[in-house]
């Protein structure tokens, strides 16, 4: 069966390296996918509009070339008016970003040829999609979909700093911005409810609503999360001070933080979070800082066909 394939490329991803290696990527696509059309994104949310139009025009396979933010925009283009446009249209991923955390959860190799081989040879699998309603930076209600991890608290502040440093053309590694943010960060008082059950109140450092396992450029925030189990893994970190973060923060790299007494893991289909007080609690989705709490996160089970691998059931 021959697919109608649309390739959407973020040339500025991976600090502009995607544009420089586009000829190599295009040649690889010709070898593995053969027939396709492609478009370059030119502005924020352009990938969403391009994807939506491609699916309406009959594309069966939409391949994204970029990082987690690009894939988030493309995934949002699979939906319109709160419905998936074509339940059989499939997402393919060519990792070409600074993070590419989603591809790790999907078991997609970083190498170009290996990733293209999965697109051309592997069957589609259906993954869960997260939907979140939140406040944008103007205070208006917003709704978006996410594939991997949504995070409120520290993560939102870190992503904001990463973006600021990029605009200033300064070093913007995630780990560097994480440490700089943590030095000044104060835990936020947040009320949280999972599937209607109140979580103990208190000050929280991190609230990760995880569909996939990994965020923050390789941190295993939810080491047992699965992309097709119909549940979020809500990982809540309470009351860490800077010295505690220095002593235990490294555990995020291998997932051993889950056993810490100040860390809770709660699985559920719906997570609600809102601040107690006037302080902003920033929110990031798939590595993009888009707004703030209050927010409601809901899982849409096995909704999006994607080229990749999902781990065996627990």
Image (spheres, helix red, strand yellow):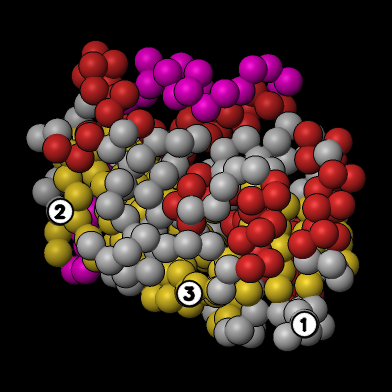
Dot 3 falls on a residue whose secondary structure is strand
Residue 47 seen in the current view = yes
User: Which residues are drawn in magenta?
Assistant: 168-196
Residue 224 location (% of width, % of height): 28, 52
- Is label 1 or label 3 in front? 1
The one of 78 and 140 positioned closer to us in this rendering: 78
The one of 38 and 197 positioned closer to us in this rendering: 38
Residue 85 location (% of width, % of height): 64, 83
Q: Is 221 situated left or right of 244 in this image?
A: right
Q: Which residue is mark 1?
A: 2
Q: Which residue is mark 3?
A: 126
Which residue appears at 24% of the width and 44% of the height? Answer: 236
Q: Which residue is mark 2?
A: 199
Asked if labels 3 and 1 touch by Cβ distance under 8 angstroms, the answer is no
Q: Is 279 situated left or right of 201 in this image?
A: right
Q: Is residue 220 above or below residue 242?
A: below
Give the number of callouts. 3
Q: Is 310 situated left or right of 47 in this image?
A: left
Which residue appears at 44% of the width and 42% of the height? Answer: 215
Residue 199 in the magenta stretch? The answer is no
């Amino acid at each position: 069966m021959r697919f109608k394939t649309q390739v959407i490329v973020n040339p500025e991803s991976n600090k502009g390296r995607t544009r420089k290696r586009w000829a190599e990527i295009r040649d690889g696509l010709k070898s593995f996918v053969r027939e396709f059309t492609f478009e370059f994104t030119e502005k924020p949310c352009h990938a969403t509009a391009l994807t939506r139009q491609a699916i309406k025009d009959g594309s069966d396979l939409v391949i994204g070339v970029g990082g987690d933010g690009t894939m988030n925009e493309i995934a949002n283009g699979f939906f319109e008016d709160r419905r998936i446009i074509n339940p059989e249209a499939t997402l393919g991923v060519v990792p070409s970003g600074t993070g590419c955390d989603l591809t790790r959860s999907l078991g997609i190799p970083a190498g170009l040829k290996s990733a293209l081989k999965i697109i051309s040879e592997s069957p589609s699998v259906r993954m869960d999609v997260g939907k979140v309603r939140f406040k944008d930076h103007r205070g208006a209600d917003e709704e978006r979909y996410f594939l991997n991890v949504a995070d409120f608290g520290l993560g939102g502040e870190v992503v904001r700093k990463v973006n600021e440093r990029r605009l200033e053309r300064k070093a913007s590694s995630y780990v560097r911005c994480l440490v700089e943010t943590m030095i000044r960060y104060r835990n936020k008082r947040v009320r949280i409810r999972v599937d209607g059950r109140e979580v103990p109140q208190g000050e929280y450092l991190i609230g990760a609503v995880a569909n996939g396992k990994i965020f923050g450029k390789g941190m295993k925030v939810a080491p047992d999360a699965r992309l097709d189990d119909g549940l979020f893994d809500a990982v809540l970190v309470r009351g860490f001070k800077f010295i505690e973060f220095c002593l235990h923060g490294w555990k995020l790299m291998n997932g051993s933080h889950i056993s810490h007494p100040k860390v809770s893991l709660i699985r559920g289909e719906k997570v609600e979070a809102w601040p107690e007080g006037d302080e902003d609690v920033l929110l990031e989705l798939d590595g993009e800082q888009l707004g703030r709490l209050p927010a409601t996160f809901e899982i849409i089970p096995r909704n999006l066909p994607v080229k990749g691998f999902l781990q065996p059931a627990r």
